Amino acid sequence: MNFTTLSKYYLESQHNEALLLIFEKVKEMGAAKKFYEEFKKRIEQIKIPQSSFLKVIECLEKNQKIHAVKVLVDETGLGLKESKNLIDGIEDFLRGNTLSTNPSENSSSQDQIEQEVKQLLAQNRKIEAVKYVKETTGLGLKESKDYVDKFG
């Protein structure tokens, strides 16, 4: 699925077009609507103005990552490192990967999450591990379960 096009549709309030794009892929309207709701939650977690987000997407489509970072610095007041980290997260999102929406998030917080999950799994507390990941990361239930499943 083309997440860049899907993101543009959403940001430009072309929700029917976005839903149809998803439907073409999943072939079932209920599943398409569910996916779109989860997609909307994730994209709304990116705390930048929609106009800036559209500019960033356009830059990334043209492989102009440095310009995309400059857009964020100029339009949001974020620092250079925060903007670069957010652009990296947006790139992952546009590839269909999980998006980290916290620009200050670093590998140490990821390590903490991983350690906590491993501890909970060692205590046979898988449900609590899934709940912890869901609450800590903002991922959906399925994505949280998939993440926990990687460790046990």
Image (cartoon, helix red, strand yellow):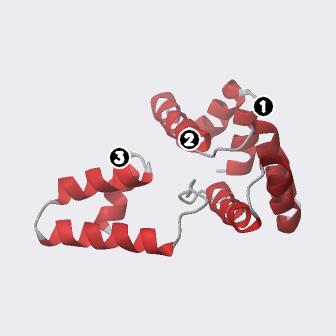
Q: Quadrant of the C terminus?
A: bottom left
- In terms of depth relative to the viewer, which is nearer, 120 or 27? 120
Coordinates of residue 112 in the picture (x, y in percent): 36, 70
Relative to 148, does residue 76 appear above or below in the rendering? above
Q: Earlier in the sequence, mark 1 or mark 3?
A: 1
Please, what is the three-letter code of the amino acid marked with disc 1?
Glu
Q: Earlier in the sequence, mark 1 or mark 2?
A: 1
Give the secondary structure at mark 1: loop
Residue 39, numbered circle: 2
Can residue 95 be seen here? The reply is yes
Please, what is the three-letter code of the amino acid marked with disc 2?
Phe
Label 1, label 3: how many angstroms apart (C-alpha)?
27 Å
Q: Earlier in the sequence, mark 2 or mark 3?
A: 2
Can residue 152 be seen here? The reply is no
Relative to 25, does residue 30 appear above or below in the rendering? above
Label 1, label 2: how many angstroms apart (C-alpha)?
15 Å
Label 2, label 3: how many angstroms apart (C-alpha)?
13 Å
**Residue at (70, 42) in percent of width and height:** 7
Residue linked to disc 1: 12
- Numbered marks: total: 3
Residue linked to disc 3: 141
**Residue at (53, 64) in percent of width and height:** 105
Give the secondary structure at mark 2: helix
Relative to 60, does residue 31 appear above or below in the rendering? above
**Residue at (45, 74) in percent of width and height:** 108
Q: CB atoms at circles 2 and 3 under 8 Å apart? A: no
Instruction: Check disc 3: other Cα within 10 Å, few if <14, some if 14-19, many if 20+.
Output: some
Q: Is residue 110 left or right of residue 87?
A: left
Coordinates of residue 30 in the picture (x, y in percent): 46, 29
- Dividing the picture into quadrants, the one containing residue 63 is bottom right
Please, what is the three-letter code of the amino acid marked with disc 3?
Leu
